[in-house]
Image: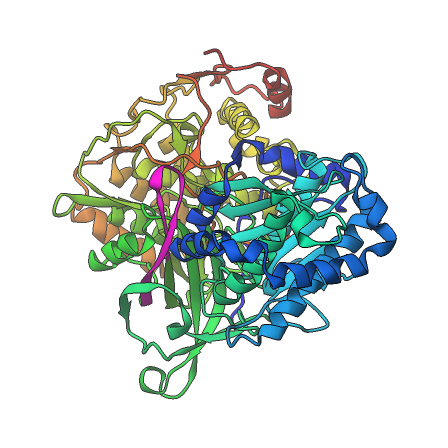
Amino acid sequence: MLSIVAGTPQKDGPRPEKFDDTWYVELSKSYEDFCKRSNMEFLFRILGDDWSVAWKSFSSNKLLAGSAVIGKIMQSYCNGCKDISRELGNFKRTSENTLQTAFGVLAEAVQDHMDSMRSTNPRIYWRDTHTTNIKRGDGTCRKPDRSFLTTSDSSPEWRNMVAAVEIKGGDMTSDHHHLRGQILQNFIDMAELQPRRFMIGLSLAGNRDIRLYVCVPGGIYYTLLGRLPRVVPTSSLLTPNETCVITFLLFLHSQLGKDCGYLTRRNPGLPGEFSLADIMGIEHVESKLPLQTTIYLDYADENDKVFGRHRHLNGQRTWAYPAQYWNDEHANGQISDAFFKFQWGFDDEVEIEVHRHVLHRKVPHVPPLLYAASVVGNGTGPKSQRYRGEAIVTENVGQSVKSIFKDGGLCVLDATLIDIFAGYVHTLLAAAAVAENKFALHRDISAGNLMVKHDRDPYIIDWGCGRVCAANEVRSQSNKHMIGTTIYMGIRILHGCTSRSVIDDLESLFLVLCHCLWRSFGEKSGHYKTLWSITRLDPVKIARMAWLANSANLLYCMNLSTQLPESLSALAKGMFELLFPDKLVFSTIKPGDVDPRIDAFDQQMWIEVFDKASRLTATGGARMPHLKALRAYVGKGSMRRISSIIEETIQTQQLDDTCEENPSDNADYGSVMPRGQAHHGDSLHTQTPTRSGSKRSPDDLVQRLGNKKPRK
């Protein structure tokens, strides 16, 4: 079965040792800027036209409020809540046990009514889960208070959950961070294994207020749904807020049965096995495989079931699986390995276009596309932004580049490693070469997006953050944003520069090499750990600048052991000198500045760096096919000039921060990161890097600069 070594984990910060009040409050505050109050009409509009139209029809039914349906449900509710009726009448403070009991009775009464309708539509099932441990993707467990599920199995799973309810009594209000943090954690767990267009949640607070939450790529939206009903003798005595809650629960049962937000047709077995024809909303299909081709998702490792950016609650989400497919016509009746990837976000995020472009240009080391389709969603986001997605199947291209590194050494010869990185350089240069007035940039080079097959063949995957651009195009912009994986972003990108060129991709490649060398040969408690153990943008910038300040002692700062081959030391030093020439100081970088390295860029100098490193290997540079191909490519003079782009304004989303120090995290297929929101300010002023060879610890500089704020 296909296996993948974990790439860049995708998350906002360190994962909690336990789910407690501290964690939920921290989680809620981290998403505070993306939680937005709205109204019912807007919430259903972002879920899609079907939801919006159905709710308008359902809620405007004048017969429903006074019908026998509401009366029958209220009768069951009152009978089940006799012993707690007095406390339910308290508008200010109701205990959690009372609320748990009352909401459970109401939900069961609604479900009993829906069961009596014997609808042919797929059903959802209400369940009390506050005592049920539900296993998460990393093997830990959580207990949502109440859940709506697609299956009645006695052992529920997060992937089968279509709505979760959190209940808190006493003085806790709907605005409390603990309550909202639980809702957000439910969304994270629901989307971790199951590709979804949206997630739905409900919260019930001590004053009986019920909030409805909807999570989509554009943000987390909520509104006051109504109030948990009191125990009254007749439904005519219910307030509109109380009636609305019952109406909504009826509607939820009806609508979730038709559309539970999955990106494939509802199947309790998903994501274990499905056919390409099961993908919902597909259009513009380009496939070498029939739609009836069955995809088998490889779950050999319980802790790494799904790769991709699916733990974030705003911005583009991706789910990627080691997969296998069976096809008599195209695979000679054999099962073949593949990658299957879902992507869901905004309609200006098009991975297929970039991937197809580089394949058409015959850029080397790019995995072939077996299947590519656009996935249309009719939900409308902020400023009428339409949501859409993509489904992609590519050939198996092995494991992450980190798989060829081990603690204290390499799994391959140093010559092979140099040859592999020469292949990566070849890919980036060939993609960025201008042909027919177009060029392409990857813009998210990370350890998870650099693959190695058979321990020798390099591939660059995940072109979802890439762009196909007209040569030297300039786009007007008013908002700063970032694209990439934070710890591998170039120094200019960390400072908010909006112009991009292949040099930024090469700088990210250099950082991946340094990170892998440090993981294998470095002292894990050393100063260099700072660069990989921090997760936020500003600390990463400060640590990177501190590292550059010690450029004359680059490898010393990394605390690398004497076991590091001389050839790899030469490769790292050579790449560093090309990317950071002595005369170039990044002490003050303005976002609008074009990269000053562009004019001096010379492909031949990169060949010289790889040639020098290869001559220090045991083979003396022989039997290095990818380096040989790179020499031939550069010899043709394919890239006579570098083109750069200045990013256009888009809907800003959260910057994707990463932390590399927790190997239990699900890795990226590659680590697709959405176009994120950068920090404001025309420039960032930090300590000017010195070139004197000072051995001052980077941690000293980090500490000295850490409390300084950028000047506006």
Instruction: Name the spot of residue 11 as percent of width and height, x first.
Output: 58, 44
> Which picture quadrant has residue 112?
bottom right
Observer-nearest residue: 14 or 5?
A: 14
Observer-nearest residue: 487 or 580?
A: 487
Q: Is residue 387 magenta?
A: yes
On screen, 315 above or below 363?
above
Observer-nearest residue: 52 or 423?
A: 52
Dominant secondary structure (helix, strand or loop) of the stretch shown in magenta: strand
Instruction: Name the spot of residue 388 as percent of width and height, x first.
Output: 36, 53
Q: Is residue 186 magenta?
A: no
> Which picture quadrant has residue 348?
top left
Please name the residue shown 37% across and 80% down the image. 292
Q: Is residue 592 left or right of residue 186?
A: left
Instruction: Name the spot of residue 202 as percent of width and height, x first.
Output: 63, 49
Observer-nearest residue: 660 or 94?
A: 94
Q: How many marks?
A: 0
On screen, 493 above or below 666?
above
Magenta extent: 371-389
Q: Is residue 367 left or right of residue 562?
A: left
Instruction: Name the spot of residue 119 as percent of width and height, x first.
Output: 53, 74
Q: Is residue 680 left or right of residue 648?
A: right
